[in-house]
Amino acid sequence: MFQIKKICCIGAGYVGGPTCSVIASMCPEITVTVVDVNESRIKAWNSDTLPIYEPGLKDVVESCRGTNLFFSTDIDSAIKEADLVFISVNTPTKTYGMGKGRAADLKYIEACARQIVEVSDGYKIVTEKSTVPVRAAESIRRIFDANTKPTLNLQVLSNPEFLAEGTAVKDLKEPDRVLIGGDETAEGQRAIRALCAVYEHWVPKARIITTNTWSSELSKLAANAFLAQRISSINSISALCEATGADVEEVAKAIGMDQRIGSKFLKASVGFGGSCFQKDVLNLVYLCEALNLPEVASYWQQVIDMNEYQRRRFACRIIDCLFNTVTGKKIALLGFSFKKDTGDTRESSSIYISKYLMDEGAKLYIYDPKVLKEQIIQDLSQPSISEDNPERVSELVTVTSDPYEACKSAHALVICTEWDMFKELDYEKIYKKMLKPAFIFDGRRVLDHLHVHLQNIGFQIETIGKKVTSTRIPYTPAAACPRIIASEPPTKKAKV
């Protein structure tokens, strides 16, 4: 059996960095080199301050960095020396051309494939780690076949990553399953066995699943679509709970105890974010449309539409409670990453809540314990978020390093990320320095245990999926909250 002794991973991001760090930690006899064109990112991986925050990751990296784990910008050399090459580059949703807003942009995957075939010689296993559309491996193989050399033998595998940010190290060390897809030929099966042998250093054989390439690629899309669907499902019930007086947490507990349903991913919130869920569901929608399955495409599109509706509905609720106007009002927004225990802001609901409030002229004071100021400003300055007017970000947004400073003289406090520290804040101190009436909008249900205490202090509390303040008179009719469809471009406002 072919034995893998050297691994190269192209892409030092949220997948490539943690995945290969854990592989190096678990397989001390294998040399692992993570490469990237981004010099500053590689410098960060080689420093005491890693480019991404993930609990336990720094300890893993420091335990083997410089021994059998290396980070480099010398991509060609790493490819040449490797027995196995992971492709872990970004596959964003296309923002132009055919498939705009749905299809995955595979330009980085293609660039990697061309670089690999150009500098490689002998036998190598090339493995997709990035989330890719079905049949992407076939595209890679066609590039390899069109540029083959007499001494070159490249085998293509699919090995999608199922880690969750915030628990990535645990997920990698104790995976539910490892999925490896490849050709059903003798050469393809040989490559699969070689990659299986790497994972068998720490993963039980029963948890390593082998399939054909297409099943592996589709399994990744389907897994994320199912998880996103559960979040949108419970969020739809949260709207019903607010209208009827039910509590979505109680409903989620009741249905989650049904073993056929289970309790995971039934946490109502301001919506899902992250690099995968929206991208993968939209990719699935595009795939179904391309295969002439419009009913299936429409079904999965509703998952995205419900997520966007939940974000817009929460923003409308803030405006409604603040006497139907937030123009010029200071609002403290606590949490900007898409979930706790990560600094990743991609597709974070905080970005969209901020956009809707900026559209109304609110002055936002944003605090997050792990997201850098530069990242927040960059996210809010995107043309689709800033309405092609990035100057308004500098006028309306202040990023602070202190949650108490963010809340000082604010009309409202909005929790958008479920950081544990927000449960421990001194809310009496915060209340004294806020304008009255002082509102808390809990978009993550992190303060449920404090409702009585907060009301005794004087706060008016609004939360997802539950009526807390029953005496509030709504200023905005429910029908006045516009529905946003993710597939449609945002409405452009006239610049003033």
Image: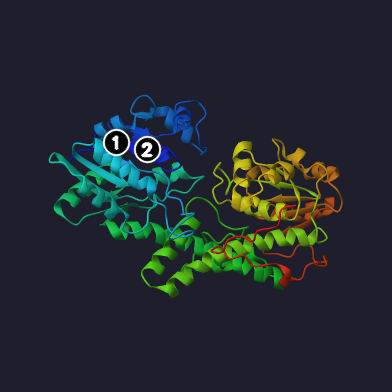
| Closer-to-camera residue (75/157) | 75
The residue located at (78%, 55%) in the rendering is 452
Please indicate whether residue 468 sits to the left or right of residue 276 in the image.
right
Taking the spot 58% from the left edge, 51% from the top edge, the residue there is: 348
The residue at the point 62 percent across, 58 percent down is 269
Q: Secondary structure at mark 1?
A: strand
Residue 318 horizontal/vertical position (percent): 74, 58
| Distance from Cα at disc 1 to Cα at disc 2 | 9 Å
Q: Is there any visible trace of residue 26 in the rendered image?
A: yes
Labelled disc at residue 20: 2
> Please, is residue 188 above or below residue 266 in the view?
above
Label 2 element class: helix
| Amino acid type, callout 1 | Ile
The one nearer the camera, 464 or 142, is 142
Q: Position of residue 315 (x, y in %)?
A: 70, 58
| Identity, as a three-letter code, of the amino acid under mark 2 | Cys
Write down the residue under mark 1: 7
